[in-house]
Amino acid sequence: MNIPNKVIECLTKSGWYSSRNIDISNYEEAYKSEGYKISETIIEFLKKFGGLDIIIPAFRRPECTDKVYIDPIRAINGIYRGNVLEYEERVGKSVVVIGETQNEQLVLIMDENGEVYAAFDNYLAKLGNNIYEALDTFCESKQPIEM
């Protein structure tokens, strides 16, 4: 997989390294208590990226910064489960919340295959086929695909 340099830079500055493998039992418990089912893809994602606060350029304002919080517990506490079920219906796949961004206005959602979406109320957009593409969408201020 070819990861853009800007994405690697943002991840590295946030404490990420390629062999990262954290304990995610607290995330698994939080998901279970809210009725989420997590795929092996999501488990592997969380082991590599869980707990990171990734500093990115603010959307269309590269002189400012924003953060992508990869924290399922924080995200679970910030959204009504019924909304997530609606997003799941629109995506057509099982999804879980994985974090937040844009001053905690957007909830980040990942489907069972690792595709990443951003959601707020009725807004739902696909950011990328994986976390690297999603972060590239943020880093390069690309327009996400609205669903």
Image (cartoon, grey):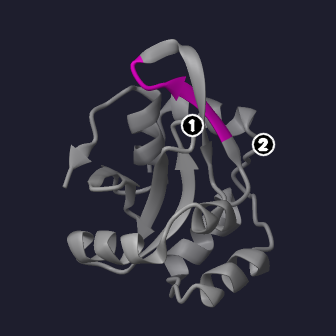
Q: Is residue 113 visible?
A: no
Kind of residue sitting beneath label 1: Asn
In this view, which residue lies farthest toward the top?
A: 63
Task: State whether residue 22 is above or below residue 43.
Answer: above
Q: Quadrant of residue 53?
A: top right
Residue at 49% in and 44% down: 105
Residue at 59% in and 68% down: 76
Mark 1 is surrounded, within 10 Å at the Cα level, by few (under 14), some (14 to 19) or many (20 or more) other residues, namely few
Mark 2 is surrounded, within 10 Å at the Cα level, by few (under 14), some (14 to 19) or many (20 or more) other residues, namely few
- Left or right of 33 in this view: 121: left
- Left or right of 50 in this view: 38: left
Mark 1 or mark 2: whose residue is earlier in sequence = 2
Give how far across and how far down residue 136 sits, in percent: 43, 36
Nearest the viewer among 125 and 34 is 34
**Mark 1 element type:** loop
Q: How many marks?
A: 2
In this view, which residue lies farthest toward the left?
A: 147
Mark 2, residue position: 15
Give how far across and how far down residue 70 sits, in percent: 63, 54
Residue at 54% in and 43% down: 101
Task: State whether residue 27 is above or below residue 115.
Answer: below
- Which disc, if any, is residue 103? 1
Q: Is residue 59 magenta?
A: yes
**Mark 2 element type:** loop
Kind of residue sitting beneath label 2: Gly
Q: Quadrant of residue 91?
A: bottom left
Find the distance from the CA under tag 1 to the CA under tag 2: 20 Å
Nearest the viewer among 19 and 107 is 107
Q: Which residues are magenta?
A: 54-60
Q: Is residue 41 visible?
A: yes
Q: Quadrant of residue 27?
A: bottom right
